[in-house]
Amino acid sequence: MEQSITTFTPCASLAALGCHLRQIKLFDVVRQQVHIAQKTMIHTPIDELYDCFISILAGAHGLCEVNTLLRSDVALQQAFGRTACAEQSTIQDTLNACSPSTVAELTAALTSIFRTHSQAYRHPYTTDYQLLDVDLSGLPRGSKAALASKGYFPKQRNRRGRQLGRVVASRYGEIVTDQLFEGRTALVTALQPLLEAAEQVLNLEQDTRARTIVRLNSGGGSIADINWLLERGYQVHTKRGGIKSGFERAQPFAGVLGAGPQPLAAQAIRAAKWPPAAQANGGFHGYS
């Protein structure tokens, strides 16, 4: 009589997700487009990259947790189509072997995956506004970490770390793009590269930018940033603190918003009625 072997995993819901990701062949795009110049011993470099991806889904905070979270969980490996898991030190070697061209290939692969499965990419611009939130999140790290420098980290004075910049399609809860910056970086510096990357991922043209609302806090609401967004045709929703309430600061908007019968400062600073009305060359809305 044959004896059945049963395996258990504490990550049953993640195992179900793994079966689904295999069915839709999510990682096949990465296997086809990403190339890592490294010799294959037991596991291919892409398989090791796949193990890293599964470990992140399993809640790993670093590669030092791969052995305990994934390598010891045979059922979870099988759910994702793996018969074994690479050792954490070899995964680290694979990541160290990645070059700038590898990063570019992975970025292109992730963009392809996003466009295939994302709701934000299929947003109906003709009937509703797309809402993009742009902000930075502080990531405290050791002084030897890449891009680590002194910067603003809430309730942690004199800490070093990095800033994680993200553009989020808020109506769908999807991260459109994210980038790492130095710890001293503020949103006023990171805004343009983040929006340009989001434009590429979402394939935003002039007509779709006019139906897209960019929402910022006061750190990204400088005169130059707002004018740059308006010139590109976006609708803008930002805090009043970024422009200072006063007629002397309202004049730079004249070329974009156009002077109407009301004082321009009153147009720029008044509270926004949500959702905002469309304007030919983009719209600006301030809130306290």
Image (spheres, helix red, strand yellow):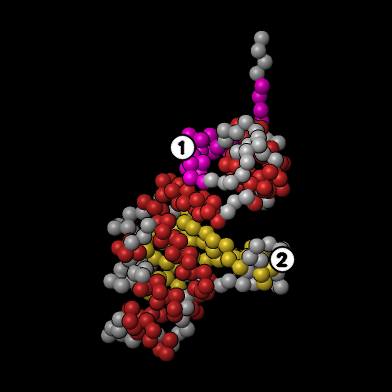
Task: Please give the range of residues in magenta.
Answer: 5-34
> The residue under label 2 is which amino acid type?
Ser
User: Is disc 1 surrounded by few (<14), some (14 to 19) or many (20+) residues within 10 Å?
Assistant: few
**Which disc, if any, is residue 207?**
none
Question: Residue 150 location, x and y as percent?
Answer: 67, 72
Q: Is residue 52 above or below residue 190?
A: above
Callout 1: helix, strand or loop? loop
Verify whether residue 31 appears in magenta: yes
Please report the residue visible at 30 percent of the width from the left and 68 percent of the height from the top.
278
Whole-percent x, y for residue 63 in the image = 68, 48
Res. 18 in view: yes
Is 171 included in the stretch rendered in magenta? no
Q: Amino acid at mark 1?
A: Ile
> Which residue is labeled 2 in the image?
143
Nearer to us: label 1 or label 2 = 2
x, y percentage for residue 246?
Answer: 43, 88
- Would residue 20 be seen by someone viewing this image from the given angle? no
Residue at which label 1 appears? 24
